[in-house]
Image (tube, rainbow, N blue to C red):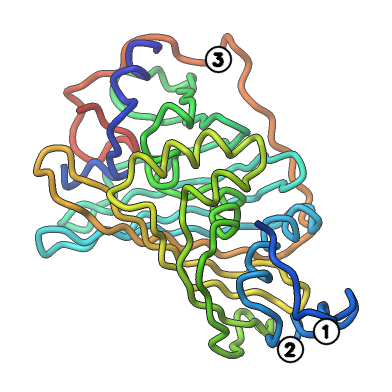
Amino acid sequence: MDRWQHRRAGRTVLAVGIMLGLGTGASGCSGGRAAADDVKGTGDPVAVLHRAADTLRGAGSSKAGTSMEMATGGTRVTIRGRGVYDYRHRLGRLTVVLPEDPTGAAEHRPITELLAPGALFMKNRGAGVPADKWVRVETASLSDGNLVTGGATDPYAAAEVLRGTRTAVYVGTDTLGGTRVRHYRGTADLSRAARSASAEDRASLTAAAKGFATAEVPFDAYLDDQGRVRKLRQRFSFVNGRQKTAVAVASTTLLYAFGTPVDVRLPRAADIYAGRIAENEPPGTSPVRHP
């Protein structure tokens, strides 16, 4: 396993394998006035977005839906996930579904992913891994910090990226799933996000800032009246290791049903696969591929 992790470090590969500081409100406003401004969408957008991750932690937990899109060679591929997340303990569980093959027949089993501080656990990882074993990956060893490798962006890590917001504008209100939301559009900087991130995400975001083609992350964020992220669409750019060309990846995170009970139990050491991952697996069988 150590050998595999070493080979993975330093190169970002998209999760399909198919194609290959905190701001303040307006000066003179009290805390109550600033909160009221946030609800109206008239508060400083940058300051509002800097607080988004902390607001999620205060919310406790939620259900989550994810999608990751990549367009290359005239083909668009989308990976979808669904699960739950505990923001206070930084634990989540997602079921990630890889795309169907061109004939329309599903050829890949869903992948179960457990998200934890500094680590990603995957079951149904692909060729060479026993069906009852998990693969464990240190997220800081991935050159994208696991923002795209797993086929789904960790919901809390996605919110942590907003700590690096440099510019943002308030677009207006919208409705998502019957909930009124405020739409913000802006650009975040991964290096800045890493400096402001929680200790659990600092190393991963630092790796992403160095590993992506650009540290700038354009985004659209939709927050409810309590400041909780309801939808976050982020656009990352990484370099295709084979063709040395920049590839754009759009990651969308949907958060809903806040307060949902979450029980995530990480695998025991005996349940983690420590062998070598097969390199001749068919395309698309795994969210992580070797160079």
**What crowding class fits label 3: few (fewer than 14 Cα within 10 Å), some (14-19), or many (20 or more)?**
few
In the image, is 188 to the left or to the right of 285? right
Q: Amino acid at mark 3?
A: Asp
Q: Is residue 74 above or below residue 144?
A: below
Q: Is residue 227 above or below residue 85?
A: below
Could you say which quadrant of the image residue 75 lies in?
A: bottom left
Say how many tags the image has.
3
Distance between the Cα atoms at labels 1 and 2? 6 Å
Looking at the image, which residue is at 57% across and 38% down?
A: 202
Asked whether disc 1 touches disc 3, contact meaning CB atoms under 8 Å apart, the reply is no
Amino acid at pointer 1: Ala
Viewer-proximal residue among 66 and 47: 47
Write down the quadrant of residue 275 in the picture.
top left
Of residues 78 and 240, the one drawn nearer to the viewer in this rendering: 240
Which quarter shows the C terminus? top left
Residue carrying label 3? 271
The secondary structure type at the circle numbered 2 is helix
Task: Tell me which numbered mark, 2 or 3, is placed earlier along the sequence.
Answer: 2
- Tell me what residue is drawn at x 48 percent, y 30 percent: 140
Q: Nearer the viewer, mark 1 or mark 3?
A: 1
Image disc number at residue 40: 2
Q: Residue 267 appears at what percent x and percent y?
A: 61, 22
The residue wearing badge 1 is 36
Q: Which element type, helix, strand or loop, lies under badge 1?
A: helix
Image coordinates for residue 128, horizontal then vertical, percent: 30, 18
241 relative position to 59: left or right: left
Q: Position of residue 192 (x, y in %)?
A: 52, 51
